[in-house]
Every structure is written in structure tokens, then in C-alpha cells.
Amino acid sequence: MTRGWQCVIVLREDWGGMRVRVDVSASAPSLRWEDVHGPARAVVYGLLGSQDAGLAKSLHDDGWKGHGLRPLGVTSPQFKGAPRKSGVYTTSPEGSVWFGSPVPEIAAVLVRALASRSEIVWGAARLRVRGFTLDVAEPAAGGDQMVLETATPVIVKRESRYLLPGEPFFEERLLHNLAHKADVLGLPAPSGVRVLEAGPRRRFTVRGAPRIGAQVRVALDADPRLVDALRSWGLGLDTVQGFGWVR
């Protein structure tokens, strides 16, 4: 299985990105709230480091090729059919965690690492790996606008303040972040972004500090190659901590 995935990556150097859905079941009926997004960064670097310690250290310390950003995306664990319980992040036997990168070199290392795992330690929980689905993006067709919807909250800041959709400067700062990502990938900057719909305010604690955001559906005026790349990277800040993942 691993060899097949690596061949796809080698043959598709002009792709728009790679996404891997890892199907999991949790060892506990719920996750601690600090473990919803808190462990994501360590999990990603641990996976990369298990296959390429130099790449993991370089990304962690310096970002990607002289840019401070890390072209990596991940979700918090998502569970289908989890029972609703007020104030509790419940789990179920049908969970998944998505990982991705728009950079083939990084994506290949992620795939190798994930293919070797029978479980993922996520904070205090152990997620048993039940299977994988590899999703390599086909080039998107051009159009006036592309619509993207996120599965996890988008984090946007201005100065030291978190912004929510509908607040002044939210779209401006989100567009600035997207332009920075386009620059990292050597693609044209997007010309506009507009929030079409937003979910409720969500607050999580990550390494003792708050992260505040909301899920969004946005219309993006951008090169189709950037749109494809964002599907395996995410919108906004802290994508390596599980925020801003595109459905």
C-alpha cells in the first residue's frame, strides 16, 4: 500500500495537494477539551520525524524554504454518531483525522509515516487506526469564484486580537493570510475573499493559550491551483494545530 501511494506522489508533481483520511476508533468515550486541538502539532511533527527527522526539525524551527509558514494541515479528531452530551467532546467507533500538505515532499513523508501506524496517540487518548483513504486533488476548473467550507474553526488575528466572521478586518486579515500562503507556493495572490456563512464562536485551549474562531463558508477569487492547495493546507492561522481544515 505504501509503495502505491508514493508512486502517485512521484508521478503527480503538478498536483494541487494531498489529503489522507485516517479512520480511527477512540480508546475512551470522550476527549478532554484541551486534547481536541492541543496535541495536533506534536502529532504532526512526530509523524514527520519518524520518517525524516531533518525535515521535521527544519519545518518546526524555520518553516518552509525561508518562509515562516508551514504548509501542513490536519483536523482535530472527528467522530460520526458521537452521542450528544452537554460540555463533553464525545467519541465513537467511527472517527477520522485528516492530514494534508500541498507540498509533495512533505506529503510523501506524511504518507509513509501514517502507513506505518496502527494507532495514533492523541493527548491522553489512543486512536486505533482502522484504515486510510488517500485523496490527491485533481486540478480545479477555473471560474469566477470558488466556494470553500471548513470543518474546523478558522483562526484569524489582527495585532493580538482574535477576529470572528462579521467583525471589522476579518476578511482583510484572512485575505492577507491567503496571499502569504500563495507566496510560499509560488502562486498568484488571491484577489478577494467573502464570507458567505459562519458557524458559532468556538474557543479552545492550546498549550495553555486560547484559540478563538468559527467555521466558515467563503467565496474566493483565486487561481484554481491555490484553491486546490488550500484544500490540503487550510484557511487562516494554526492549520498545523487542526484549525481551518477545508471539507
Image (cartoon, helix red, strand yellow):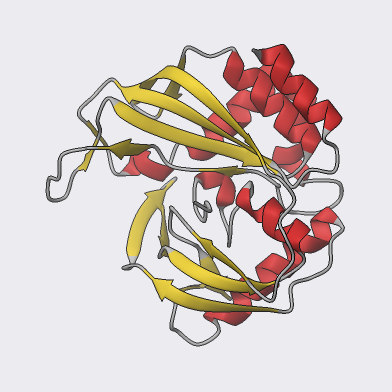
Q: Position of residue 51 (x, y in %)?
A: 71, 18
Which quadrant is the N terminus positioned in? Answer: top right
Q: Position of residue 149 (x, y in %)?
A: 49, 61
Q: Is residue 58 left or right of residue 203?
A: right
Which residue corresponds to the image point at 74% horizontal and 61% vertical from the top-left? 224
Q: Nearer the viewer, residue 92 or 13?
A: 13
Q: Nearer the viewer, residue 110 or 20?
A: 20
The quarter holding residue 167 reads: bottom left
Using the image, determine if residue 163 lies above or below residue 167: above
Q: Please say whether residue 177 is visible from this viewpoint.
A: yes
Residue farthest to the left? 85
| Image mark count | 0
Q: Is residue 16 left or right of residue 122?
A: right
Using the image, determine if residue 3 lies above or below residue 44: above
The quarter holding residue 235 reads: bottom right
Q: Please say whether residue 164 is visible from this viewpoint.
A: no
The quarter holding residue 240 reads: top right
Q: Position of residue 208 (x, y in %)?
A: 40, 49
Which residue corresponds to the image point at 29% horizontal and 37% vertical from the top-left? 80
Q: Nearer the viewer, residue 134 or 204?
A: 134
